[in-house]
Amino acid sequence: MQPRVGSFGSLEEGKEPMVRTISQSNRPFPLRLLQFLLLLLGLGILFSFLSMYASRFLKVQSEISVVQSRFQPCIQDKNTIASWIKPPANILHEMNDTELFWRGSFVPQIKEYPFKRTPKIAFMFLTRGPLPMAPLWERFFNGNEKLYSIYVHSLPSYQPDFPSSSVFYGRQIPSQVAEWGMMSMCDAERRLLANALLDISNEFFVLLSEACIPLQNFSIIYRYISRSRYSFIGSFDEDGPYGRGRYDERMSPTVNLTDWRKGSQWFEINRKLAVDIVRDSLYYPKFEQFCRPACYVDEHYFPTMLSIESPELLANRTLTWVDWSRGGAHPATFGKGDINEEFFKRIFNSGECFYNNQPTSLCYMFARKFAPNALDHLLEYSSKFFGF
Ligand SMILES: *[C@@H]1O[C@H](CO)[C@@H](O)[C@H](O)[C@H]1NC(C)=O
Ligand SMILES: *[C@@H]1O[C@H](CO)[C@@H](O)[C@H](O)[C@H]1NC(C)=O
Ligand SMILES: *[C@@H]1O[C@H](CO)[C@@H](O)[C@H](O)[C@H]1NC(C)=O
Ligand SMILES: *[C@@H]1O[C@H](CO)[C@@H](O)[C@H](O)[C@H]1NC(C)=O
């Protein structure tokens, strides 16, 4: 803001002396001189009017040049549609969550866009710190620059060190501490969504972790997601202590027992559902108050809320493969020794699912969890296994 104020100031200074000359010359004088001064005054008024118009025009110009010099070259005229639809030049901002969520919830009321809009997938990485699979993702993204955007939420103490050539460079959003199973985890996911919503071309929102990898090339994943009638979020009604057993009756009638859903947090949702999550103030307080460990809120809040509000938009399954077969509280993590053809055959043949109401064996676009030491093998075989 500072430079903009400065440039206004310097324009105003140009006008100041003229006004002062006029007021100073306002003393008793002989008639001739007075006539002459009146003429000057008239001219002065005329000029000041002219300069007002000119400066209004110049102000706009100087504003633009300030913006241009501080950020990247952008739009010439602030009043074009382009100024409303361009993504924020800088992903960092000074908004707190209240302000960010409010801004992120803006929705146009006319469905048709008056410009050519290429829908992008926002890849949102919810991490603690480093992204060990970054080289694999770099390869995955390569060549698809117009079709994706990236957002990274990491612990605030973490200092990323991606080179400026990386797709992850400068994609860290203002973050806060997020703890697994706590509301702060949902807050982080909403923060990622709200930041991604600021770019109006983002239409699909995929939540990933640092242990996730893509299982298909970009074009397959883009087509799978963009042509789906449904959003992919795990959402099922489970009996027993880990499902309905986590429900608290004090949530009713906002959430009844029959509405209670469970699903893994790794979702893919469209823009409408992303806005619904960011703007929610009805379900949030219920989950914050009544779903605390051993109720793991990140497994229930979004699936339950979206199933109540928009059940017809949900595929009720996730695109992210994971292996719970080893038992315990955490899914299996795969390392160097696990990465071979058999392993990926097992993933690709792990059953049937529905895609746009048709049965298919292509069910998963992403997989977790992979240890950093799996990277070399994944890179070596990525074209064979995943087609990129
Ligand atoms: C954000 O700032 C506004 C205005 O200062 C304040 O009312 C609001 O409570 C803040 N929100 C958070 C989450 O800190
Ligand atoms: C929960 O049940 C009550 C009473 O039957 C009903 O009024 C309310 O709409 C239900 N809530 C939802 C989210 O369906
Ligand atoms: C997902 O589940 C909801 C009920 O929660 C149901 O209404 C919807 O039809 C299901 N979606 C699909 C694609 O079957
Ligand atoms: C992506 O994979 C599919 C199937 O494996 C292949 O037909 C297609 O050519 C690949 N696309 C690119 C851009 O590599």
Image (tube, rainbow, N blue to C red):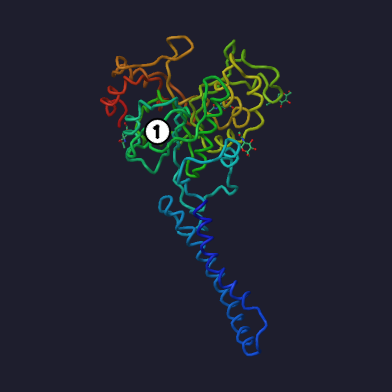
- Whether disc 1's CB lies below 8 Å from ligand 4 is answered no
Is 322 placed above or below 103 here?
Answer: above
Instruction: Identify the residue position indicated by label 1 in the image.
Output: 221
**Badge 1 element:** helix
How many discs appear? Answer: 1
What residue do we see at 57% from left, 37% from top? Answer: 96
Which one is nearer the viewer's eye here, 22 or 243? 22
| Left-right relation of 157 to 258 | left
Whole-percent x, y for residue 217 in the image: 34, 32
| Left-right relation of 30 to 380 | right
What residue do we see at 71% from left, 24% from top? Answer: 253
What residue do we see at 48% from left, 62% from top? Answer: 61
Whole-percent x, y for residue 265 in the image: 51, 24
Which one is nearer the viewer's eye here, 25 or 141? 25
Q: Amino acid at mark 1?
A: Ile
Is 375 placed above or below 56 here?
Answer: above
What quarter of the picture does the C terminus occupy?
A: top left
Q: Quadrant of residue 181?
A: top right
Is 77 placed above or below 215 here?
Answer: below
Q: Quadrant of ligand 4?
A: top left
Most extreme residue toward the left, as rendered? Answer: 380
What residue do we see at 45% from left, 36% from top? Answer: 122
Whole-percent x, y for residue 17 in the image: 55, 70
Which one is nearer the viewer's eye here, 129 or 300? 129
